[in-house]
Image (cartoon, rainbow, N blue to C red):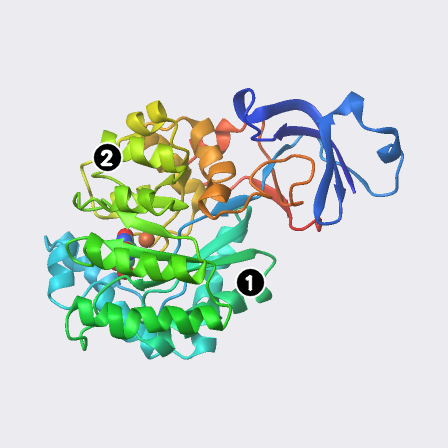
Amino acid sequence: MLLTNAKIATMQAEGPYGLIPDGAIALDGERIAWVGPAQSVPQAWRGGGAAHDLGGRLVTPGLIDCHTHIVHGGNRAREFELRLQGASYAEISRAGGGIAATVAQTRAAHLEALVQSALPRVDALIAEGVTTLEVKSGYGLDIETEARMLRAARAIGHARAVTLRTSFLGAHAVPPEADGPDTYIDEVCLPALTAAHAEGLVDAVDGFCEGIAFTPDQIERVFTHARALGLPVKLHAEQLSHLGGAQLAARFGALSADHLEYATEADARAMAAAGSVAVILPGAFYTLRETQAPPIAAFRAHGVPMALATDCNPGSSPMTSLLLAMNMGATLFRLTPEECLAGVTRHAARALGLADRGVIAEGARSDLAIWDAEHPAELTYRIGFNPLWKRVFGGEL
Ligand code: DI6
Ligand code: FE
């Protein structure tokens, strides 16, 4: 398939957006065979059967939402009301609400219910050009429900034209029945990880390092186990306070550290040295009405790649729009529109350890988003408007 008459934001590192103003893309099934200026299309691809004139439309890599909790039972609209009346996220969590409330609803949902309730949210992301989606467990907090969440995630990957990547997040919260965090880690979380991994359900291991969740020492035990199983790690770090999670993640060569509102310059330096991506989650910052912004300037100065994601979850970020996350990244954190687009393409791929996507380049996966837009900055600039025309997933328009 040859796509012609396209404005292409390749997102290759050279030049703004790696832009080709009048370009063409040759797709050989699941892989991109060639991309370049219209006048240089290789002879073999000229005059072939399946040419599509895109009418000058904008083409970007398929978008990647690299941090979601999109599989979960129920919702927390009632807590949203309580927070508007003044209760804080941490207070609600200490009173047994918050993550624990979603755990109860997730445990009560069978596999098919988890899949069916997640699909409309997944479809909202797909409608915005998402072709790769990460999904975490972490609302089961027992061996069976953690596995069921991940099975639901895998089922979604089979039900829709989207690549699904899973992260095991057993260290998300201490469940109400547990005899303290240490016992929970040793007797539930680590065995749950072993079991889920044995079933082929785990692509990466995540944790929540926070006062209302787990200490760096406890997370380190989870990471050590992940390493023994040969699984990459990532971490919710420095979201509500600074506990040292970002540097712990860096020490383990983490794919990413996520949230990072309270991260420091030293954290940025450690993450740069480790090659860990900073995953910025403006939906949670916005929903929790945080005032401390992540240290974007330090990430920039130290060359830490920044990704952007929805953090779609029923508590701190009930958001199913990656385009809105891009707009928030720019307006709340002063990311440039180019950084926002790199954050949902090239850098998001890296946050998932995927080297074959996130750019339009020879050999990369044929995952594309085609937009009714003239310039890539439009994707970040608009609020609540979806200019997607079509997606290409694995070479299929
Ligand atoms: N940080 C978050 O923002 C979400 N999880 C996490 O570790 C919140 C999850 C929730 O409130 O249900
Ligand atoms: Fe999260």
Which sits earlier in the primary sequence, circle 1 or circle 2?
1
Name the residue located 65 percent from the left edge and 45 percent from the top edge.
Answer: 365
Outermost front residue: 228
Evaluate whether residue 281 shows in this view: no
Q: CA distance from mark 1 to mark 2?
A: 33 Å
| Above or below: residue 71 compared with residue 261 | below
The disc placed on residue 157 is: 1
Type of amino acid at the residue the image marks with label 1: Gly
Which residue is under mark 2?
Answer: 293
Q: Position of residue 266 (x, y in %)?
A: 24, 31
SS class, disc 2: loop
Tell me if mark 1 has few (under 14), some (14-19) or many (20+) residues whose alpha carbon lies within 10 angstroms of its own.
Answer: some
| Above or below: residue 203 compared with residue 283 | below
* Residue 174 location, quadrant: bottom left
Tag 1 near tag 2, CB within 8 Å:
no
SS class, disc 1: helix
**Position of residue 67 in the picture relative to residue 182 (left or right):** right
Name the residue located 60 percent from the left edge and 44 percent from the top edge.
Answer: 356
Evaluate whether residue 225 shows in this view: yes
**Position of residue 20 in the picture relative to residue 328 (left or right):** right
Tell me if mark 2 has few (under 14), some (14-19) or many (20+) residues whose alpha carbon lies within 10 angstroms of its own.
Answer: some
Type of amino acid at the residue the image marks with label 2: Ala
The disc placed on residue 365 is: none
Name the residue located 40 percent from the left edge and 70 percent from the top edge.
Answer: 194
**Position of residue 311 in the picture relative to residue 84 (left or right):** right
In the image, 223 versus 153, the foreground residue is 223
